[in-house]
Amino acid sequence: MLPPKLTFHNSEFALNTIRERWPTILSQLVDSIYRNRETYYADAHQDISDNLKELTRHICHLRYDIMTNKPVTFLSFPLLGSAEMELWERLLSDFGVKLERSDDMKPEGSHLCWYDLPWLFAECYLYRRIVDVVAQSGLNDFDPFYLKKQHSFKNAGSFISSILFCLSKLPDLSTEQAFNFFLNAALWANEFDLSLHPDGNFQLTGFDKISDFIKCVEKQIVVNDGDAIHRFCINFLDLMSLKDSNRKLRVAVILDNSGPELVADLCFAEYFVASHIAEYVSFHGKSIPWFVSDVTGKDFDWLMNINSLELVFNNDSYKHLLTKWSEVWRKRIQDGSFHFRTSYFWTTPCTYDEMESVDSALYQDLSKNYDLIIFKGDLNYRKLLGDRQWKPGNPEDKINAFRRVQIGRPPSCTCSENFGDLKPGEPITNCSCGPLVVALRVAKSDIAVGVDHDLLTELQNKTKHWWTIGKYGFIQVVSPIVFGAS
């Protein structure tokens, strides 16, 4: 029996999200569109004033619907093709949605309302509705969060400068020191999430020494499988060497936030490729604007070409580092060391145990073409766990949650039966039956598994909201793990 999905009735944080966070995000979005209208006019090279006015009206109406728990409606625009639209229509129909957009002003009878939806589904539906009203306003390729993402990037200059400086010192770092630093930088850059911090105020700042950064963040890590991930990389290269093969790791990063987090992800990828650990790194982003600050192709391209843009840099050193590394990464794209990919699946409400049935091509690609898959951020973590009320300190819940998302690991895999001294739930670092799947996440929702019982008690004694405040990190191996003796 699976635990229930998180809803607005069983999760205090979810209820706060729909009552407070979403209305704030939508209010700030309307304000941003108005304040930046002249910039949008200039970028469009045409008069889009009426389009922007229509868009703000639609967003205000959406905000009102959420705050007053109005009925949920079908979407209007197939932005990512017929398969994506058919999926949304089927899922909404399964929940009992009956109203088309044209009907939503005068609903009659009993209808499914916002508070009736599971939290994850409702949140994904919200952001899909935002891009739906963007299209309805005649602004198909318009990203209403784009300027906010750029502003966040500029405000994080001290952190970005620090991590790029450390990347420039990569040849001077030991293997373990480099891996630990860039892994932690990729983790903690996940703090830069504009859906949790719509005001753009973040705690993470610049630092002078790697040791200072690690000392600052390591005490905030709740689950740390970093050693297991490093051991997997070493085991993989050793195995290839025994086979007289020059093959390196093939890495996929399922991206979360743009701006400083994307910089940290690129630095981690650069470490893998420059250190001859990885053959290539594939970045998987969103096809449409998503959860305020998620990476789209436009965001990725903007960072790759940042040297050609008019930006206010903090200082000459920062400017030099940023332009230097963006040039390096452009060349990585050209020579195939880096790739950027999108799939409509990443902007659906489907959890990752549904990936194989919903988007079999994506599932097969991840299963067959990668050795290490890194899922970034809280939304990906929620989807890996099915957004259910698992007990964070219950070892069985960890096994039951992760058993459903052993991506690429065939049922015939017997590594669990030959685990030696490993306990059930622990990572297997020498399994050749499928990729190592990892979650890097700063906790921003009340869902978790695999937390040590004593540590959980300590965290709960500090604050019952420990997992929703964006202060605690997870470096967690999802697959393959030990299930136990058969």
Image (cartoon, rainbow, N blue to C red):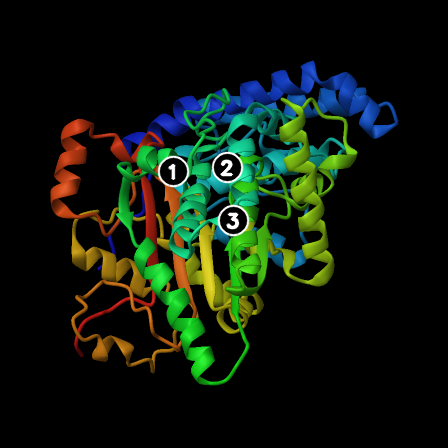
Which residue is label 2 attached to? 72
In three-dimensional space, the C-alpha distance between marks 2 and 3, rounded to whole angstroms, equals: 51 Å
Q: Which mark is residue 43?
A: none
**Is residue 190 shown left or right of residue 224?**
right
In the image shown, does 258 or 114 lie closer to the viewer?
Answer: 258
Q: Earlier in the sequence, mark 2 or mark 3?
A: 2
Q: Earlier in the sequence, mark 2 or mark 1?
A: 2
Q: Quadrant of residue 31?
A: top right
Tell me the amino acid under the disc marked 2: Val
Q: Secondary structure at mark 1?
A: helix
In the image shown, does 285 or 73 lie closer to the viewer?
Answer: 285
In the picture, the quarter occupied by the N terminus is: bottom left
In three-dimensional space, the C-alpha distance between marks 2 and 1, rounded to whole angstroms, equals: 9 Å
**Is residue 472 shown left or right of residue 87?**
left
Which residue is label 3 attached to? 170
Image position, residue 372 (x, y; %) = 46, 64
In the image shown, does 413 or 471 lie closer to the viewer?
Answer: 471
Q: Earlier in the sequence, mark 3 or mark 1?
A: 1
Image position, residue 443 (x, y; %) = 34, 38
**Is residue 18 shown left or right of residue 332?**
left
On screen, residue 74 above or below 413: above
Residue 374, can we see it? yes
Tell me the amino acid under the disc marked 1: Asp
In three-dimensional space, the C-alpha distance between marks 3 and 1, rounded to whole angstroms, equals: 51 Å
Q: Secondary structure at mark 3?
A: helix
In the picture, the quarter occupied by the C terminus is: bottom left
Q: Which mark is residue 116?
A: 1
Total labels drawn? 3
| Residue, far right | 46
Label 2 with label 1: CB-CB less than 8 Å: yes
Q: How packed is label 3: few (under 14 Cα within 10 Å), some, or many (20 or more)?
A: some
Q: Nearer the viewer, mark 2 or mark 3?
A: 3
